[in-house]
Image (cartoon, coloured by chain):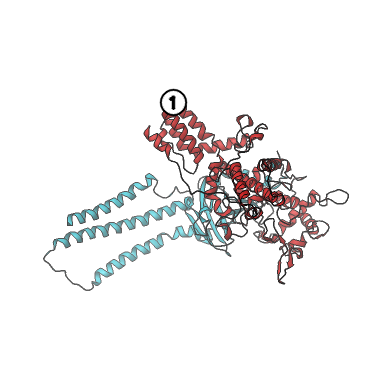
Chain colours: A cyan, B red
Amino acid sequence: MRHAAVALILLLLVGVLAFFAVSPEHGWWLPPSASTVATEIDGLFDAIGIVIAVGFVLVMVLLAWAVWHGAQNREGRSRSTHGHTGLEIAWTAAVAAVLVAIAFGQLPTWAALRDPAGKPAGGPTAVVVAQQWSWRFEHAGLDGRLGTVDDLETAFELVVPAGEPVLLELRSRDVIHSFFVPELRLKQDVVPGRSAPLWFTISEPGTFELVCAELCGFGHYAMAGRVRALPRAEYDMWLAERARDQRSRGSEDAR
Amino acid sequence: MLLALSACEFEPSGPSRTYSVAPETRAAFETDAAALVAFESALLGAFGPPEHPRYALVGDWKAAGIDPNRPDLAPEEGGSAEIDADELARIRAENVREFAPELEALARGDFEDVTVSARRPALRRTWQALCEEHARGGLDAAMLRSRGTALFTEWYPALADSAELYRVECLHCHGVEGGGDGPSGQFLEPRPRDFRHGVFKYTALTQPARPRRDDLLRTLHDGLNGTSMPSFARLTLVERHGLADLVRLLSIRGEVERRLAATFADEGELEEDAIASETADVFGKWRESAEKVVVAESDAPLSTPELVARGDALFHDATKGNCASCHGDHGAGDGPAAWKIGLSGVKEPAYLDAWGRPILPRDLRLGIYRGGARPIDLYRRIWSGIPGTPMPALGTAKKADGTPAVPSADVWALVHYVRSLDSNAVPER
């Protein structure tokens, strides 16, 4: 019986570790990271994952040891103890040390994401407007400034330059939404009545899915969008093309 | 081979739906229940049930090379060539991406790996028929491969495919008949569009006009800002084309029903070919719209303080724009003409829209433009008005001597004045 119990515990231990070991190559892992800060975030994720794995192995091995020895002890009585100052100090200090290490270890990443000192200079590249149940974007246009007559409005797709800092301003018209781009490892709640800044640098050109990560009503499932990062030259071409669209007299609609 | 057949043979069974007639139609046929039953069954014959919508009465149109069941095909192939070659090329490029797994399996010859989602029932049936023919020996593997490759690459949704997509994405707001009365629709303000009037607010056209395919596609791609109509850009281009086809069918079906209900209320009977002739008439109106696109006389000018000032004057001039009478002195949508004192002595909206609901002028300070935010989009709102609402068409208004009351250049001035009212705009910095 105790053989079976210990085998089950060890099987579970090995199974869980094996699952995580093979997950990344089967695509059961995070999507590829696409922003500069994503690498740091993934590094933190892995580091914390390893700490948790060590704790998990320790607990499972102890459990297996206890089952093995406890089951063997047919005649003996359990020993009743109350308190062990040295042991208590040891495990409290060990856990505290790990938590403090994590807390300080993640500070640079947090700062890269949120420290106003790291906020890109100048105005936002675009304003993101969330509403039930759409994402809309006001791009700064050719002059790079918002609130001027050449601003461009798009639905669904946010277009940004790749390889340079992008500053967004997030707003909501109705309820709380959340701007979530998994590949950029960014998630920011959008609260009505407030504007939230969000900045990042996309390392390579590409197209990334944007979803709403805060249940916002019956159309929440449909509140999808897209972030398209273009190399600077193509981005400028896109802006110029949209600027021409702003001057349109509508003749492209007449065939 | 058995595997191939089992993959092909699954037939999806969705909950069954039936079209019901509008309450007004029911009222018109109140005295004659038998006539209502006959009318409903004639409509069913002409437009099919919700799972298999189709235009059944295209006999006379075929001669003119028109079959709205196949808008993607050229007339010589039995369609009505409503989609140009560039757009078809875009659709095919997207199909190659969308059906990449199926096309790869076909190239390998692994026919049992080709599975078509139940979300595309007509495509599924066609593939199933090909598989069966192959199993009977009527089609060798090379033929099945080439026919299958063409099937997926050149796929354009049949109305039945789009009906299934409509059921999933649109029906819960717009309703089975497109009456804007789906179960979720009642919780929305503004209400979802009722297609059955054939009136669509945001198009690029002089009114009255049924929308063009491109107008419906714009609404599907961009959504309607400030309403609950979201962007459907997450669907593929060809799926949006298919939904535009289905919206047209639902709208034509609804308009034919409304017209004939009115005829029956007046005359107490319907002619034998009433549905066929009304359908041809309404469909003809949809075909005319391509000629009605509003094009400004000049490109959109850049905004200048002078232009905005001129727009300001026109906006408040009762003999020119007269916009302030409804939209208010500051564009807040609080002009005196928009409100009245109701029977109960309470201030209430003065106007109803075409769908019978109270309507107020837009608060222009919000900077939310439902029909699009480009200057030309606002130009068209002002030039053609907004159908179904009290917003008048300034562009077609004429002075006593026949000259335009508000020339094109003045409409641009109004556009820039309206854009300058946007107090929600991000302050310049």
Front residue of A52/A78: it is A78
Q: Which residue is mark 1?
A: B140
Q: Residue at x 85, y 51 (%)?
A: B399
Describe residue A85's horizontal placement relative to residue B15 as left or right: left
Q: Is residue A97 visible?
A: yes
Identify the chain of the residue marked 1, using the numbered disc in the image.
Answer: B
Describe residue B7's horizontal placement relative to residue B170 as left or right: left
**SS label for mark 1:** loop
Front residue of B264/A236: it is B264
Q: Position of residue B283 (x, y in %)?
A: 67, 41
Describe residue A86's horizontal placement relative to residue B111 as left or right: left
Q: Is residue B99 visible?
A: no
Q: Position of residue B117 (x, y in %)?
A: 46, 42
Describe residue B169's horizontal placement relative to residue A24 as left or right: right
Amino acid type, label 1: Asp
Front residue of A80/A117: it is A80
Farthest residue in the bottom direction? A82
Category of crowding for the residue at label 1, using alpha-carbon neighbours closer than 10 angstroms: few (below 14), some (14–19), many (at least 20): few
- The number of numbered badges drawn on the structure is 1
